[in-house]
Amino acid sequence: FGLFQREISNGSNLIQAFQKVSKRIQDRAGDYENKFRFLSDFRSYSKRQMLKNYHLWAPTLDDLNQVPPKWSKIAWVTTPFRVGVFVSAFFAFPHLCAILNALVEVSADEFDIINEQFTPGIGILYGTFVALTLDILYERQGKVQENASVEAALL
């Protein structure tokens, strides 16, 4: 609403003000990293004291304005966590099967019927999920490359 008021106060007519507002809405739509966000957010990649002082040596990675993330936010990405999930799932699976076997009793004939009818459908569903996930990841990688190019061009 503020953009609309500014455009009217700057002498634009109603149609031009509505066009500017609709363009802003389109620019803000979509992913978090978009054209409007690149142009409106202040980004600081270096420390201020590095810019104020004259240094005789070349800049290093310590001069960048990077705050290390909290351990709780990155713990799930670490190798020990991923190995722990795999190992715990591996050792928990037989116990889970024993519990489910005690709850549900299935005869051999019923198991064959379930196995012949249910398993191919699950395989197709799993393949579809994998294909969809890979498609989303490829699209996301393209957007990351595009955003990196746009941001590098804006520097």
Image: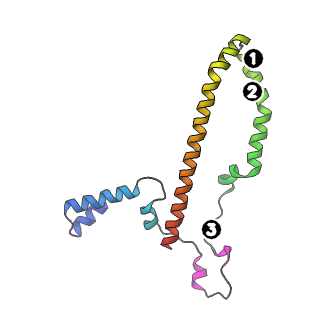
Quadrant showing the N terminus: bottom left
Residue situated in front as seen by the camera: 6 or 12? 12
Q: Residue 27, position in %: x, y?
A: 39, 58
Q: Amino acid at mark 2?
A: Leu
Q: What separation in Å lies between label 3 and label 1 (alpha carbons)? A: 54 Å
Q: Amino acid at mark 1?
A: Ala
Question: Is residue 108 within the magenta segment?
Answer: no
Q: What secondary structure is marked by label 3?
A: loop
Where does the magenta region start and end? 46-63
Question: Is residue 49 within the magenta segment?
Answer: yes
Read off the residue under disc 2. Answer: 96
Label 1, residues with CA under 10 Å away: few <14, some 14-19, many ≥20: few
Q: Earlier in the sequence, mark 3 or mark 2?
A: 3
Q: Earlier in the sequence, mark 3 or mark 1?
A: 3
In this rendering, is residue 115 above or below 126? above
Q: Residue 21, position in %: x, y?
A: 30, 59
Residue 107 visible in this rendered orientation of the protein: no
- Residue at 65% over, 53% down: 73
- Residue at 68% over, 85% down: 57
Q: Earlier in the sequence, mark 1 or mark 2?
A: 2
Q: Is residue 66 left or right of residue 94?
A: left
Read off the residue under disc 3. Answer: 66
- Residue at 73% over, 12% down: 108
Read off the residue under disc 1. Answer: 102
- Residue at 27% over, 66% down: 6
Q: Residue 11, position in %: x, y?
A: 20, 69
Label 3, residues with CA under 10 Å away: few <14, some 14-19, many ≥20: few
In this rendering, is residue 24 above or below 139? below
Q: Is residue 26 left or right of residue 17?
A: right
Q: Amino acid at mark 3?
A: Gln
